[in-house]
Amino acid sequence: LDIHPAARLGAGLMLDHGTGVVIGETAVVGPNCSFLHGVTLGGTGKDGNSDRHPKIGPGVLIGAGASVLGNIVIGEGAKIGCGAVVVKPIPPFTTAAGIPAKIVGKAKPVDHTKAPDHSLVNDCSAKWLCVWKHVLEQNMSSVKREAQVNGTGAVVTCYNLQRALTPLGVTEAECQAIFSKLDRNADGVITEQDFQETWQEAAQNYTNRACDKGTSLGCCELLKKICNAIREDQPPAPPTHEPTGQ
């Protein structure tokens, strides 16, 4: 936990876990905010020694591992998804996720007469990074091989996706449908950027809509099942043995 003594913190700030939380000198945090572990309110390095840290409005939720950088305003009641990197202002009562963070949905209005609501309206979009990390963790050796062959960063194949998601109750056919949606270049591999952009697009399209089993990705319930099965506070299941030649 690293909070600069000059930072201004409002009443009712809840730090769910203090580990890794960093709050810079000129940061301002409004009342009744909630930060999970690993949250950073930092600078961009472009503002010198002036007012260089974020201004967080009342009732804001910032998810685990998220970074809010620069002298920007996060509006009242906004919610920042886990792992997001926020470098631009976020309007009040919206949900932002991704790297860099983009608006992916609306946040529920704050009811100060009740306990804070930490749910995300568009939870599937905000958790794309959790799903990506889970897929990588379950396929470390084969992902490294693919990266070496392609000469790029981490990429995953349909086999990698199946290996990570079938233990969560996703069928092989559903995995193939998801992969065909995410593989926008039809080259048999998915990069992190592909995964982020297409996953969020799919989640945005299907969350809060009636299930349509005729779509290529299945329905919103499939996305929710995957997201809800992955818990950041639990270690991933031990990877199974990879068949030779894969």
Image: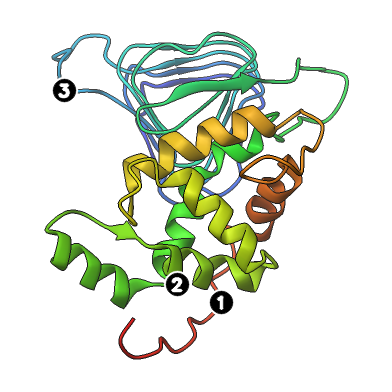
Task: Report the residue at 33% width, 56% height from top.
Answer: 189
What's the residue type where badge 1 is placed? Answer: Ala
Say which residue label 1 marks.
237
Above or below residue 89? Residue 96 is below
Q: Are marks 2 and 1 in contact (CB under 8 Å)?
A: yes
Q: Outermost residue toward the right? A: 113
Mark-to-mark CA distance, 3 and 2: 36 Å
Q: Which mark is residue 207?
A: none
Q: Give the structural element (helix, strand or loop) at label 2.
A: loop
From the top left corner, tell me how far across and down residue 86 is, in percent: 39, 24
Task: Report the residue at 70% width, 50% height from top.
Answer: 222
Task: Say whether residue 167 is left or right of residue 191.
Answer: right
Could you say which is closer to the camera, residue 241 or residue 112? 241
Mark sitting earlier along the chain (1/3): 3
Classify mark 3: residues with Cα within 10 Å, few (<14), some (14-19) or many (20+).
few
What's the residue type where badge 2 is placed? Answer: Gln
Task: Say whether residue 170 is left or right of residue 196.
Answer: right
What's the residue type where badge 3 is placed? Answer: Gly
Mark-to-mark CA distance, 1 and 3: 39 Å
Q: Give the image quarter of residue 51.
A: top left
Say which residue label 2 marks.
138
From the top left corner, tell me how far across and down residue 225 is, in percent: 71, 54
Classify mark 2: residues with Cα within 10 Å, few (<14), some (14-19) or many (20+).
many
Q: Give the structural element (helix, strand or loop) at label 1.
A: loop
From the top left corner, tell me how far across and down residue 184 is, in percent: 39, 40
